[in-house]
Image (cartoon, rainbow, N blue to C red):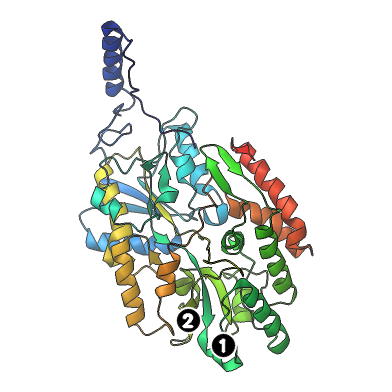
Amino acid sequence: MAGIHTVVRSRRKALTIAVISAATALLALAGCGGQGSSANGSYGFPEAKQGASSTITVWVDADRQAAAKAFQTANPDTKIKVVTYDGSANGSNSFRTKMQLFDRAGDGWPDVVFSSQNNDASWASQKSAGKQAFAAVLDKGLVPKQTLGNFTAGSLNPCTVEGRVYCLRNDLAQAVLWYNKSLLEQFGYALPTTWEEYQALGEKVAKEHPGYIVGTAGDAWTPEVFMWGSKCQANDVTGPKSVTVKTDSTECKRAASMLDTLRGNGTVPVVSVFTPEFLKKYTGKVLMMPGPAWYAGAIFNNPQSLNVKAGQLGVAAPLPWKGESQAATGNVGGGTWFVSSHSKNLKAAEKFVEFATTADAYQVDVAPGYPAYAPAAQKWVAKQEASKYYATPLEPVVTAASQVWDGWGYPTFSQEAIWAKTITPGVTGGKSIVDLLPDWQTAIANQAKVNGYQVK
């Protein structure tokens, strides 16, 4: 990722007084032009003339409409216009594509945008075709330091580019092992403590209880659960524009082989958890499922999905591979909120983003996922456990938040989109994931090069 753009560069001592004066004059002129923008605003980026708009436009996906509604209830004097879009789900890249259109038009940018992806700061923090970066810098006074300091350690890493923060995380999406405690006890199975035991259990389930499943591999985020959790170095961003792509390692092959085995016996089907087919075939038959923290509210405790009854759903810590002292886990989205650097009402835009990520009225009372904001996360866990819905304590979800492996980075391109285009069609066509690993590596490398990365 390129360095953060600043209009006023540090002047060398060798510059003469005359040159310095000329440069100062030019900057003063720049501050007067550019559609009312300031060349170097109060918060470290060029600002549009403030107060020009009393209404802010907020882009959300369907699930985050509740955040907008909660904000409107709590802040009736702040006017917002809510626009619903896909949130760049599954790596659609719609957020970036639409902002590029506004860049070309020179107008139309929303004030706030929610994205379901964690790699958007890598492009939103950069100039595009000579235009200023879309994302506003948040940690130079726009968002209070105390607020930023209260986010869970490491949670703002996907939002941080060259030491500056460009977005706020909505929720954390660390992967854990969800399981149906009632079914596990009914079948007389012990909870697996390693991935090897998990595979062995899947093979046992296939023979003794056909039709029941121990996971799924049909969503675009499958590699973020299984490959990332196995420390597969397929997406290791090692520098601003460098990435290491290595899918022929033991770490990659062991996860791929496990998925091939369980996919072959039907216990880890290649079907999306958000399809009618999944609900029809597997409601009441999910023995366990590795997946992100947000599966709790989005899939299990959801009348429109699996609707698992209270007292049945348990959660265990991420699984290690045999011989490893500590498990690693992947991160499946979690969502990010951006304030537009083009906003003509930065204070209202910041107010919305801070509310959406920190306020109890949304993060604790409404949001289904584990909040990235630590004070809200503590209250969220307490509320969930007080509901008596879960069969076990939620401590594994809390612990897993600090176990996300840092060898899987956040480049400008989407790993989910690459997996969906490369692996999913091959698997549905009868190929094994192990055999497709070279194709996956080539696809990642090619996409990285297209986006200007040096690939190792």
Instruction: State whether residue 336 is above or below residue 364.
Output: above
In the rendered image, residue 253, in percent from the top left (x then y), is placed at 70, 60
The residue identified by callout 2 is 314
Q: Quadrant of the C terminus?
A: top right
Asked whether 66 or 431 is in front, the reply is 431
Which of marks 2 and 1 precedes in the sequence?
A: 1
Q: Residues within 10 Å of mark 1 (few under 14, many from 20)?
A: some
Residue at the farthest right position: 430
Number of marks in the image? 2
Query: Would you say the residues marked 1 and 2 are in contact, meaning their CB atoms lie under 8 Å apart?
Result: yes
Residue 185 appears anywhere in the view: yes
Give the x, y percent position of residue 415: 59, 52
Residue 397, x across and y down, in percent: 43, 70
Viewed as shown, does residue 124 lie left or right of 15? right
Residue at screen point 33% across, 58% down:
357
Residue 43 lies in what quarter of the image?
top left
Q: Secondary structure at mark 1?
A: helix
Q: Nearer the viewer, residue 101 or 254?
A: 254
Q: Quadrant of residue 107?
A: top left
Q: Amino acid at mark 1?
A: Leu
For the point 43% across and 63% down, the residue is: 401
Front residue (pair 319, 225): 319
Which residue bears the numbered disc 1?
Answer: 184
Mark 2: amino acid: Gly
Please say whether residue 364 is visible from this viewpoint. no
